[in-house]
Image (cartoon, helix red, strand yellow):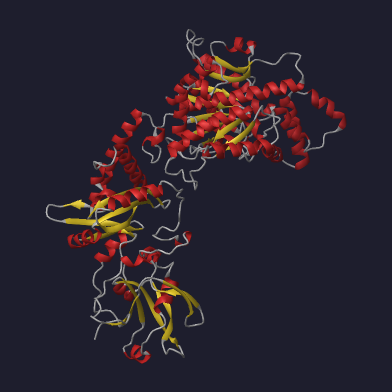
């Protein structure tokens, strides 16, 4: 893991130039190795490794690394691990005073009392213009007389905006053109780091003076979408964002000119009242702007007047995160706002480059402060129940996880028993509804279970995650122990040979699969063995632990035979790899009835690869039956190849087929019907050398004949008469 991360960082450093607006390059890391890289079953261990490597690489290469996580469990575990490492390791650049403030504000946020109040500064890293830059952009969109330019520059910014609004109205025919120009200048496609960090805070409400949609986008990506007011009315319990000065999504709502400000109270008094209420009842976190906004001053003044005279000075309205230390602002807002500077101000005689460097450094410290605040605000423990995160847990969490997983599994079992989708013991019998495929179940009688038990004997089996195709457990058993061990209540009590930690991880994996409405696939790796089955289990565990197993869409045994140069040597012995569902469905298959239409049954043995021309001029790859065709869910996928196996070349009488009224041919393997095909009466051919006949077919997947002959799991055909060698049977037997 560390080597791959270092290769990424080294490549980025050699390719990406030093940024102008940051002290260090900013690089984003995904959750390396967890999609198809093999770490999907060890997420906790992978996360620990990534955090350790990222800390070391950031310091060694002089870069800022941001870990981007989509999964809530991964995010909450990462924040816990960073807190465990301590402030000096995870946020070393922050001073002790800022670290204590970040912890304190995180505690307020966890309690649901922190409300972010966002200014234009949080959008700067995404390329948003400052107030002056916005007016310069708007000015380029209209014609301003040369003699008026100097006078325009002397105006206050609010008045400049008013002049530009009038020019847009005159030159474009409506005020709407001005709002649309403002929206076009600030509507950016991507947000920077600050909105992403703020979006992670557990806050039901947020307030902004910004027009852009960057914070809303960040909240959506953080899986915490917000209803934007006043454009929309949030439902009870929904998170919201109040845009005091309008939004690019409604250009007519934008507040920019002096007239807009003067008319604000009469038009949006209810919005101001909401802000005042939050100033009184919550702790506001002001990020990204100075405190020079006239509208803000007016709101704070109204709140102070609403407070009791004896208590207004002691009532702390919120915290301001400022870039630089400003003694005069501290004096003005003392007792009302706690102003936290990220850095000391640059010297008064500092040059332009020095000022820019100081701004960039202070902006980075602000991002680090928000990162630490978000970490201490995180109060989510979903990683405790999520599968594959156990390596990130401490001892107490591991014990709690085991207890919770056992409780959860018992509750799932109770629900499944009520719905009839599980194994249940009765006093004198077994009744079962086994998950076979795609969430479907098959009811199994006692006699079938006894037959399956006799067939299995001693065996080694795999539990496979159907979401990825990756095995997550390998075990051994005798008779039907796998049915309990893999699926239901008996799995909650660890066998003596299975360590408790290993057992808990298995149960957690099964529980996670069921949370997605699925069941683990059970494959019988080898069955019908003697005492050697313990050695087979050990060898299989060693094998799977030595090679990287990647996600596979081909979820059936022997799907990748071509990976090895040697042929499979044990296929004819009948004890090789099979899915439990296929085994049970074969034993549970009902007998083929005699009330079917006349049929031609073709018994197929194991597949033989041998290219030859088939009727119609096509070339078939071989004949027989492949093990991957055993799964009924893949019936349509393999229908063409299976049809090629049954349609040629046979010693049969075309006249008898026509006389008996046979219209369908059926593929049979291991005594169970596997596929139904309609014979095309006009597409018969005869080999001129051997005299054997063939025909073309069309697969049948539904209808009354299909239901009687194939159904959901196939029908068992009678054993052939003693001494019979032909693979063909005319049904019903005459």
Q: Residue at x 28, y 50 (%)?
A: 534
Estimate the x, y position of residue 584 in percent, counting from the top left.
Answer: 27, 61
The furthest residue to the left: 428
Which residue sits at x=39%, y=79%? Answer: 678
Q: Position of residue 426 (x, y in %)?
A: 15, 52
Task: Give the camera-side residue of 341 and 4.
Answer: 4
Residue at the right extreme, as displayed: 147
Compared with residue 521, is residue 32 higher up or lower down, i.e. above or below?
above
At x 34%, y 52%, the residue is: 462
Outermost top residue: 310
Q: Nearer the viewer, residue 300 or 537?
A: 537
Q: Is residue 714 above or below residue 491?
A: below
Of residues 177 and 116, the one nearer the viewer is 116
Q: With 664 as the anchor, is 18 left or right in this view?
A: right
Can you see residue 560? Answer: yes
Quadrant assignment, res 45:
top left
Where does residue 161 sit, x and y in percent of width and height?
Answer: 73, 30
Give the residue at x 14% y 56%: 429
Query: In the figure, 119 relative to 27: above or below?
Result: above
Q: Residue 484, position in %: x, y?
A: 24, 50
Q: Is residue 109 left or right of residue 146?
A: left
Residue closer to the observer: 220 or 385:
385
């Amino acid at each position: 893991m560390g080597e791959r991360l270092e290769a990424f960082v080294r490549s980025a450093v050699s390719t990406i130039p030093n940024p102008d607006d940051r002290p260090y390059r900013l690089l984003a890391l995904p959750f390396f190795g967890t999609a198809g890289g093999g770490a999907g079953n060890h997420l906790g261990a992978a996360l620990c490794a990534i955090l350790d490597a990222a800390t070391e690489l950031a310091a060694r290469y002089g870069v800022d690394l941001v870990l981007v996580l989509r999964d809530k469990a991964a995010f909450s575990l990462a924040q816990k691990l960073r807190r465990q490492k301590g402030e000096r390791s995870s946020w070393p650049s922050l001073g002790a005073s800022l670290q204590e403030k970040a912890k304190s504000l995180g505690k307020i946020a966890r309690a649901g009392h922190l409300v972010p109040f966002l200014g234009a500064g949080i959008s700067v890293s995404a390329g948003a213009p400052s107030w002056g830059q916005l007016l310069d952009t708007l000015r380029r969109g209209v014609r301003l007389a040369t003699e008026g330019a100097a006078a325009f520059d002397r105006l206050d910014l609010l008045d400049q905006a008013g002049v530009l609004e009038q020019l847009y109205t005159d030159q474009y025919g409506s005020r709407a053109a001005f709002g649309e120009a403002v929206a076009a200048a600030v509507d950016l496609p991507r947000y920077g780091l600050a909105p992403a960090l703020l979006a992670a805070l557990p806050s039901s409400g947020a307030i902004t003076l910004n027009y852009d949609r960057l914070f809303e986008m960040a909240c959506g990506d953080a899986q915490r979408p917000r209803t934007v007011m006043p454009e929309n009315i949030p439902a009870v319990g929904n998170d919201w964002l109040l845009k005091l000065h309008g939004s690019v999504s409604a250009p007519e709502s934008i507040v920019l000119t002096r007239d807009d400000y003067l008319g604000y109270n009469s038009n949006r008094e209810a919005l101001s009242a909401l802000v005042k209420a939050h100033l009184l009842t919550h702790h506001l976190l002001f990020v990204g702007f100075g405190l020079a906004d006239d509208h803000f001053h007016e709101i704070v003044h109204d709140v102070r007047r609403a407070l009791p005279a004896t208590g207004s000075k002691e009532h702390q309205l919120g915290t301001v995160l400022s870039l630089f230390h400003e003694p005069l602002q501290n004096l003005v807002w003392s007792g009302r706002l706690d102003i936290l500077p990220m850095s000391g101000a640059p010297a008064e005689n500092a040059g332009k480059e020095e000022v820019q460097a100081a701004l960039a450094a202070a902006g980075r410290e602000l991002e680090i402060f928000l990162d630490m605040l978000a970490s201490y605000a995180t109060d989510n423990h979903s990683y405790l129940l999520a599968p594959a995160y156990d390596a990130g847990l401490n001892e107490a969490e591991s014990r709690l996880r085991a207890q919770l997983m056992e409780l959860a599994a018992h509750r799932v079992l109770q629900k499944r028993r009520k719905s009839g989708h599980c194994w249940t013991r009765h006093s004198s019998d077994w009744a079962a509804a086994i998950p076979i495929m795609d969430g479907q179940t098959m009811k199994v009688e006692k006699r079938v279970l006894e037959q399956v038990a006799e067939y299995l004997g001693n065996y080694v089996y795999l539990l496979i995650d159907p979401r990825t195709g990756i095995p997550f457990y390998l075990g051994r058993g005798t008779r039907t122990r796998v049915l309990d061990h893999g699926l239901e209540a008996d799995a909650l009590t660890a066998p003596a040979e299975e360590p408790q930690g290993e057992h808990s991880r298995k149960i957690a994996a099964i529980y996670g699969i069921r949370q997605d409405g699925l069941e683990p696939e059970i494959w019988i790796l080898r069955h019908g063995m003697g005492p050697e089955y313990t050695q087979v289990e050990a060898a299989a565990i060693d094998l799977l632990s030595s090679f990287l197993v990647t996600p596979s869409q081909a979820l059936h045994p022997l799907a990748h035979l071509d990976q090895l140069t040697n042929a499979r040597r044990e296929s004819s012995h009948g004890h090789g790899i099979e899915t439990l569902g296929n085994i049970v469905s074969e034993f549970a298959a009902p007998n083929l009835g005699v009330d079917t239409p006349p049929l031609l049954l073709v018994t197929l043995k194991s597949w033989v690869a041998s290219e030859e021309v088939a009727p119609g001029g096509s070339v078939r790859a071989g004949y027989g039956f492949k093990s991957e065709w055993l799964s009924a869910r893949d019936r349509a996928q393999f229908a063409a190849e299976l049809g090629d196996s049954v349609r040629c070349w046979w010693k049969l009488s075309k006249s008898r087929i026509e006389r008996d009224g046979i219209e369908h041919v059926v593929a049979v393997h291991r005594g169970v019907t596997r596929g139904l095909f309609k014979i095309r009466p006009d597409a018969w051919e005869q080999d001129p050398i051997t005299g054997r006949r063939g025909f073309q077919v069309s697969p049948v997947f539904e209808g009354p004949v299909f239901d009687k002959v194939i159904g959901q799991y196939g029908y068992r055909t009678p054993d052939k008469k003693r001494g019979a060698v032909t693979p063909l049977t005319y049904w019903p037997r005459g």
